[in-house]
Image (spheres, rainbow, N blue to C red):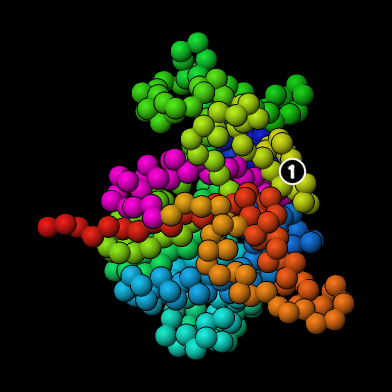
Amino acid sequence: MSLKDDIKSFLHQNHWMTMEQFMEWALYHPDYGYYMNEQKKIGKNGDFYTSSSVSDVFGKVWANIFAKTIHEHDLDPVVIEFGAGTGRFAKQVLSSWKDYGFEKQLSYIIVEKSPYHRQLLQNELIGSSSVTIFSSFEELKETYPDFKGIIFANEVLDAFPIRVFRKQKNSWYEKVVIFEEDKDEIRLNYIKTSDHSIWLDQLFASRRSDFDLEVSFQMMNWLKDIYEWTAEQSVYFFVDYGYSGDEWNEEALKEGSIRGYHKHKIENNPLFYPGKMDITYHVDWDQVESSAKKHGIETIQFSMQGEFLLKEGMLSLLNDAVGTDPFSAEHKRNRAIRSFLLDSSLANGFQVVMQQKKRTVL
């Protein structure tokens, strides 16, 4: 049996499943899910790169940001990273804290759902006494019922399963997954829905309704849980690729932003390679900000990653490169810094959102 067989069996009995359910199985199925299996995902031999896999300068800058934020906002000296993957970013931060003399003052907590990645984290961070690893948000909350610190999530929001809607002839339709037995093919189709009509009209009021419109109920529920659990003054950093406002009405997004990454190539059909391919999409930052406002969370900053890293002092990490060897550590670091600040993907493809929970005014 394979995940594809399980999906076919389900569709044979139930006729269709939402994109949310398909993504849940494809990414998080306990036996076959992409993030849950032992397939290498990040780096040259994986399917994609992350910012921390490009260079350690990414983690070094963030190490400073965390320490500064804790000091300026009088927070508990704790950073929580969700979805730490291989642990490379955490290791970069902890190494920098050690160099700065912060290691004994600050604590680092990781919440990682995947058993495979938890094992990678333990291997990568062995000997780091200031690190605690949890398998779920529920486990974290039981241990820390009160928390006033920093929440950090890099490329986490885009990993929550989504549902996809489109309005046709004044009626809402949902894009779902079906199975055509005569062609032995899993494919997408639209079915009429009335469950969310009023809510969808409100949510997508500024969007072209003849486009595929994506929404992650799971992401918004997760944000709600995070916002409600954390104490006043807590700070949240979300780093991801996304769009806001009229950017969503560009013709290129008529079919939405969902896609797959397989062996460093974009796969436009998210149904290909279930369990063997990353499925992702662009975050709707308007939905994130709307959720924040409902819970008394203020968006302090929204900027392109390159602009943010420049402001936070990445240029100070440039080396006076010695020698002409282009593969020396100094030259590699300098190239990485230029990529973070100038490259269209790293600098302008990602955004950084900083939020804070407001004090209650009595």
Q: Quick one: label 1, few (<14), some, or many (20+) residues within 10 Å?
A: some
Q: Is residue 134 magenta?
A: no
Residue sitting nearer the eye, 277 or 261:
261
Residue sitting nearer the eye, 107 or 38:
107
Tell me if 340 is positioned left or right of 328 in this view.
left
Residue sitting nearer the eye, 133 or 128:
128
Looking at the image, the residue that sits furthest to the left is: 362
Looking at the image, the residue that sits furthest to the front is: 320
Task: Say what amino acid the circle numbered 1 marks.
Answer: Ile
Tell me if 4 is positioned left or right of 291 in this view.
right
User: Which residue is pictured at 70% across the width and 54% down the height?
Assistant: 343
- What SS does tag 1 mark? strand
Query: Where does label 1 land, which residue?
Result: 266
User: Which residue is pictured at 49% across the width and 66% down the height?
Assistant: 81
Stretch of the chain drawn in magenta: 275-300
Residue 243 x %, y %:
54, 41
Residue 82 in view, yes or no: no
Q: Quadrant of residue 289?
A: top left
Looking at the image, the residue that sits furthest to the right is: 325
